[in-house]
Image: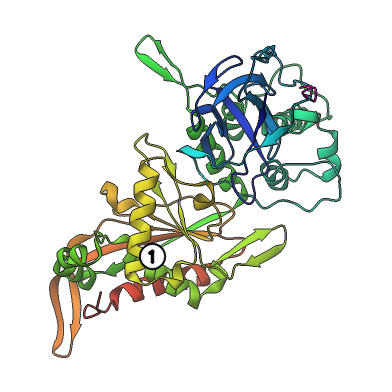
Amino acid sequence: MAKVELIMPKMGESIMEATILKWVKNVGDSVEMDETILEIATDKVDSEIPSPVGGKIIEVLFAEDDVVEVGKAIAIIATEGEEPAASPAIAEKSEPSVEVPQPTPAKEPVKEVPFTPAPVESMPASASNAPSTTTTRFYSPLVKNIAKQENISNADLETIQGSGSNGRVTKRDILNFISNRQSSSSNGNGSLSKAAPTPTPAQQTTSQVASARNASTVSSGNNEIVEMDRMRKLIADHMVMSKHTSPHVTSFVEADVTKIVNWRNAIKVDFQKKHGEKITFTPIFMEAVTKAIRDFPLINVSVEGSTIIVKKDINVGMAAALPSGNLIVPVIKNADQLNLVGLTKKVNDLAFRARSNKLKPDEIQGGTFTLTNVGTFGNVMGTPIINQPQVAILAVGSIKKKPAVIETEHGDVIAIRQMMFLSLSYDHRVVDGFLGGSFLRRIADYLESFDANQSY
């Protein structure tokens, strides 16, 4: 009888572990090759894990909500021969910590079969910069990033009792530690208050993130109480963390984009016939952003403590709304190396796969700057929140016809022009008003000087 180990797959360069969300198949169930066995989650995406072989599940090595390292066996599948005595499936945990025994080695050889998981639900990218540490204890990039943002020392990390596999510190563990520390400090003498303090908005968000992941709706009189789904909880956590991390400043400019609107209206039919793609305004905005970043490279940075890390690659994220109402930010890597046609193809592809929940984990990480188009909702401007660990994010508003003063060789005239507001939110720790304002103005300059005679 051949036995095959189902291995926790590697979901991205910076991802070292994943959480088991749900076992679709249980011990004793038969599975076909490529049939989904379980669903897992990282801080990047949710994914379905298919069976690498056909057979019967004889052992499940981890329970739902367990955090498992990449490369570890999570189930055993028997592929042929007599049915072995099935090990009972691991019961649902009532406590966060479960000690999972390793399977007894079988006489038959156990082989590993590689496979590629199929992503099903995307979620926002989280900052993965980790604090330096000399400890030999393993911490996931997400845990280390939270520790860095909350100024938790390595010594304090060592004192946290982990509820994950082999004592691993999970996100829930470190959030509970932060909540308890805040409660302790609010009492003044370092001991916990007898009366629970009123939670701050940040603590409320922490509580929401640590709560049950299944969305539920409860009616109460004339009110409807809706539990956040898992993705919305992550978005809430990420947004609050950004506001706690960066002092936000927002600058605004108005740009005359009449040339761009007229050019697009004139060529959009031929462009689609020639390239098989619809051209939107987003790749044009993105091209102007990459040019401005080359002029002002200190916008393309991240911050670690008192260190500024200047990124050589220009990886532009584009915020996209999902059918669920949640938000995802797929990233165009090395966007400055693509021409307008290349940017159009990439923007359309990522937008389509974002809406279809088919993005890969690596496609929503590594961004160095983010562009969001609030004009698609009919908004004239916005004040977006920085997508950590970046230091700036650009919002472009809707394009409106307005009377504007035009300078000509014969004097000033008033004409109807296509006008658009641009707003830039930036991290005032490292981007001051001169840099942020100059960068934003340069983007507007590139848009206003758009070459309406360029080939495509």
User: Residue tagged by mark 1?
Assistant: 286
Nearest to the observer: residue 142 or residue 339: 339
Q: Would residue 353 be visible to someone looking at this image?
A: yes
The span picked out in magenta is: 100-106
Instruction: Locate residue 412, reporting x and y percent.
Output: 16, 82
Quadrant for residue 73, please give it: top right
Q: Would residue 253 be visible to someone looking at this image?
A: no
Residue drawn where x is 81% and y is 32% of the image: 160
383 sits left or right of 46 in the view: left
Quadrant where the image shows the C terminus: bottom left
Display colour scheme: rainbow
Residue 105 part of the magenta segment: yes
Residue drawn where x is 39% and y is 60% of the image: 423
Using the image, determine if residue 72 lies above or below residue 55. below
Q: SS at mark 1?
A: helix
Instruction: Locate residue 357, reporting x and y percent.
Output: 41, 40
Instruction: Locate residue 20, reporting x and y percent.
Output: 61, 28
Nearest to the observer: residue 164 or residue 433: 164
Nearest to the observer: residue 205 or residue 83: 83
Q: List the single residue furthest toward the bottom.
A: 409
Give the prevailing secondary structure in the magenta stretch.
loop
